[in-house]
Image (cartoon, rainbow, N blue to C red):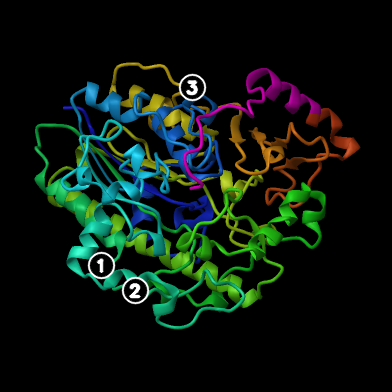
Amino acid sequence: MAPNVILIMTDQQRADSLGCLGNHQIRTPHLDALAARGAVFAQHHTPNQICSPSRASLFSGQYARDHGLTRNGVALAEDRPLLTHDMKASGYRTHGVGKFHFQPILAGPEHKMPDSNAFWSLPESESWQGPFYGFDTVGILIGESVCATEGGHYAKWLKEKAPEAAALYGPEQALEPGPEDLDEVWKAAIPEELHYNTWITDNACDFLKEQDKEEPFFLFVSYPDPHHPFSPPAPWCDMYDPADMPAPARVEGELDAMPSFVLDGDAEEAAGSYVDFLVNPGPPREQGFLQTTRGMSDASVRQAIAHTYGMISMIDHNVGRILAELEEQGLAEDTLVIFTSDHGELLGDHGLIRKGPVGYSALLKVPMIMAGPGVVPGRREGLTSHVDLRATLQGYLGLPAAPTGGISFAAMLGDGQAPGRSCVYGEYHARTRAETYNQTIITGGWRLTEYPGDADWGELFDLEVDPGEHHNLYFNPAKAEIRQSLLDRMAQEFPPAPEAGGISLATY
């Protein structure tokens, strides 16, 4: 029988936030153990800094310009061939639980989209569990933190289980007050047993218990954390002392050489914070809620980092539960387990927080661990991308070949020395500021980001000399030749496509 597959995804988790990827302060024992028996892809990238486009790219094997979900608020076409359809064509049972984000959260009820809150007030939602984008069955959670209790299977379950518990996610009910200069940091009062991470894990474990051992399965487990707000429940909110957290990596004045929009986010934030937006969405905002940390104390930023680490450790704990259930059911030896995230988080680096149009590695480089039959343990240094995963699994599992925009790295699973890509591409499609549309090319030694709509903007970093990306060389005359060679290559292989994508149905 073909191997089973479990794909575990987090939201907004950068690559350097796991022990197995070099973080010596975070505690992720279960993921580190998974990595010890699997392949750790140290140069894995997402092609987009934003949730929905990245997720659609991973499942479709296409860039956003091709699959059409170019920005949050656009829906992925329901007839788009995805990895799940490949699985079903080969006899796999497909189930997913958690955050999908293939459709806009705020899409109106007339669209009847299960990934939107409005759907769950319709009669059609009463007993709906799928099918959904190639999944036979799903358990949907919509959003994160304070907005995860409005629609979806989890919100429905919580309302039935503990009707008053939804309010315990909010800052008003926090276990203790958060910092005044960063309203996205608090200790959520929701009990761990009612938290969505626990519900997702319970659902995944129930699926494994009920699985027919003679039928291969594909299980997607998608956690909304560690996406901001930075609000884990106890005991995870107290697991790390903010004073022990690493200082963000930043160089004084480095943003002066970056595109001017990077500093403009503070003015937009003054009109209303992300928490305000979650509770009462207003006019469209540029995606990611990029903001500088100039108005935040060092202590507040460190507390955000501590809470992020707490959320990741909570996820690690729940991954451990899934892996234990896999063992209990006698399925471990026949299952490929994949762990990754949709995109990263700045978390104070460069004096910035959250995410946005910039092409920093903190946003584009994400974890990728794969462990299972035929996978040789060890670290992989070759470049890989989310758009490659569908082609890779087609090769690894022997699925029917279906065209994708990716390049299979199946050879790297069995051979730690097999090469990766010569470069990876990224692309950001703007929502409110068209000129922030950009394209990124990353090679083994360089990262270049071009803004076709504004000749005064650009990013170029020497990753060998400046791996932290603090010194923008885009307009340095001494780097004109390398800049032009990268621009020429991108123009030939990945030309601008700012108008690509479907219509926006909502602001989020």
Which residue in the protein does label 1 denote?
Answer: 194
- Crowding around mark 2 (Cα neighbors within 10 Å: few <14, some 14 to 19, many 20+) is some
Q: Nearer the viewer, mark 1 or mark 3?
A: 1
Q: Are marks 3 and 2 in contact (CB under 8 Å)?
A: no
In the image, taking residue 176 as reference, residue 463 lies left or right, namely: right
Q: Position of residue 370 (x, y in %)?
A: 37, 40
Which segment did they paint magenta? 484-508
Residue at 34 percent across and 44 percent down: it is 109
Q: Are marks 2 and 1 in contact (CB under 8 Å)?
A: yes
Residue lying farthest to the front in this orientation: 110
Residue 22 left/right relative to 476 = left
Q: What secondary structure is found at the residue carrying circle 3?
A: loop
**Within-10-Å neighbours for mark 3: few <14, some 14–19, many 20+:** some
Residue 121 magenta-highlighted: no
For residue 45, say whether it is visible.
no
| Circle on res. 405 | 3
